[in-house]
Image (cartoon, grey):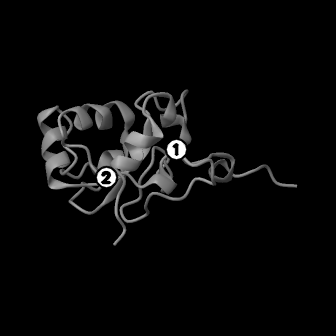
Amino acid sequence: MNAPDETTAESNVYGDALASCGTDPETGVQRDGVCHDLPERDPGRHEVCAVMTERFLEFTEVMGNDLRTPRPELSFPGLEPGDRWCVCLPRWLEALEARAAPPVVLEATNESVLDEVSLETLEANAHDEE
């Protein structure tokens, strides 16, 4: 019997199986499309699946992290509004406070973020698929 896949072993903020955040561009610390909870390998906590907005991209650049510029050496394609990306929980919280937080894809956001942010706050900032 095969060991369980990390994706199926993790849950989203609703306690359901963690969905893929995105594969175009391929996101996640492991570049497998999933916002894993990997405390040993990812101290930045890239656990929030968010849909990029111009406001957030500007905010994070001002904060010292340019997410627009491709960095092939890091397997980073550069982002634009509308892209889904696993963002750092601390940066998302900073953006929330600054009213620049990108909308969250709840089905693909790791339940581990609930130790820092309430489900109600996440739901209030959820991405509207329509």
Name the residue beneath numbered marker 1: 110
Mark 1, other Cα within 10 Å: few <14 / some 14–19 / many ≥20 = many
Question: Residue 56 versus residue 68: which sits nearer the camera?
Answer: 56
N-terminal of the pair, mark 2 or mark 1, is: 2
Residue 10 found in image quarter: top right
SS at mark 1? Answer: loop
Q: Which residue corresponds to the image point at 82% horizontal and 54% vertical from the top-left?
A: 2
Residue type at tag 2: Pro
Q: Which residue corresponds to the image point at 18% horizontal and 50% vertical from the top-left?
A: 69
Mark 2, other Cα within 10 Å: few <14 / some 14–19 / many ≥20 = many
User: Is residue 63 toward the left or the right of residue 109 in the image?
Assistant: left
- Give the x, y percent position of residue 104: 37, 51
Q: Is residue 5 above or below residue 25?
A: above
Q: Which mark is residue 103?
A: 2
SS at mark 2? Answer: loop
Q: Is any part of residue 32 visible from this angle? A: no
- Give the x, y percent position of residue 101: 25, 44
- Give the x, y percent position of residue 106: 46, 53
User: Is residue 99 toward the left or the right of residue 5 in the image?
Assistant: left
Residue 111 found in image quarter: top right
